[in-house]
Image (tube, grey):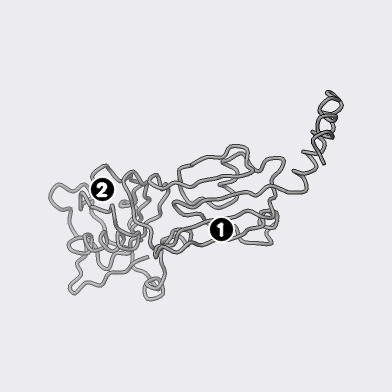
Amino acid sequence: MTSLPSAEPQQIGAVPAGGGFSMQAAPSPNSAARAGRTATPAAVDADYKIGVNDLLEIDVFGVSELKRIVRVNTTGHISMPLIGLVEVAGLSPSDAEALIALQYGKSYLQDPQVSIFIKEFTSQRITLDGAVVRPGIYPLTGQITLLRALAMAGGGSQLADLEEVMLFRLTPDGQSLVEKHDVLKIRVGEAPDPALRGDDVVVVNRNTARATLRDSLFRDILDTINPFSATYRNAVTP
């Protein structure tokens, strides 16, 4: 949660021209403690920039009338009570919080505490590949963890090695980050469920022993059905 100081803060006392209500932010008994907190969930990358069509939940502490769930329009703006259009596309969640707090602090609220929760990251994508039921590119809608992403792809296939799930990520400074996760441990709470970011690539490796066994059984079945295949293979094998 972002706290923006104001040299001469004002409180709402009367309905402004064209306004539909009046209010005053509820006093906070621990404003100093709250100033050190951030309302942006830890799952949101600090470098993430709000994009067009993202769905935001905006809350002003102590003023329930100002709480809104809004989608960023095609011009990068959102509409908020009293202050109207605010351009947030291209800003980080904390910067957008500070901007909205600044607008409310000018004429309406004393030391407003604004929080932004990103409900849908519609401008972001993740890739799920390897031994999953439905590999492909998926929209990053809301805060998606590794388990939720695998569920979107139908889970692991019969040959999936869920003890070796690879996460490939490109950091803001252009470095490639590779992580290996044990989904079986995540499922029982023995390991954290990592949050995914835009452009992450998740690859579920195949279980080599299981794949070899399947191929061997398939060959045995094929030889039973078509004995000439085994004769041919023996003839070409030195």
The C terminus: image quadrant: top right
Residue type (three-letter) at the residue carrying disc 1: Pro
- Residue under pointer 1: 194
Residue designated by label 2: 76
The part of the image, by quadrant, that contains residue 234 is top right
Residue sitting nearer the eye, 196 or 85: 196
Lower position in the chain sequence, tag 1 or tag 2: 2
State the SS at label 1.
loop
Within-10-Å neighbours for mark 2: few <14, some 14–19, many 20+:
some
- Name the quarter where the N terminus is drawn: bottom left
Q: Residue at x 58, y 40 (%)?
A: 153
Judge by depth and name the residue closer to the eye, 66 or 228: 228
The percent coordinates of residue 41 (x first, y second) are 45, 60
Does 215 appear above or below 101? above
Q: How far from the left and from the top, in percent, is residue 196?
A: 50, 54
Report whether 229 appears left or right of 78.
right
Q: Position of residue 60 (x, y in %)?
A: 33, 58
Q: Residues within 10 Å of mark 1 (few under 14, many from 20)?
A: some
Instruction: Give the answer, above or below, for where 219 lies relative to 42.
Output: above
- Frontmost residue, 211 versus 20: 211
Taking the image as shown, residue 181 lies to the left or right of residue 229, namely: left
Which element type, helix, strand or loop, lies under badge 2?
loop
Q: Where residue 186 sits in the image (x, y, percent)?
A: 66, 56
Could you tell me how far apart the alpha carbons at marks 1 and 2 are, in whole angstroms?
A: 29 Å
Residue placed at 44% from the left, 52% from the top? Answer: 198
Q: In front: 24, or 192?
A: 192
131 vs 144, left or right, is: right
Residue shown at 20%/53% (left/top)? Answer: 83
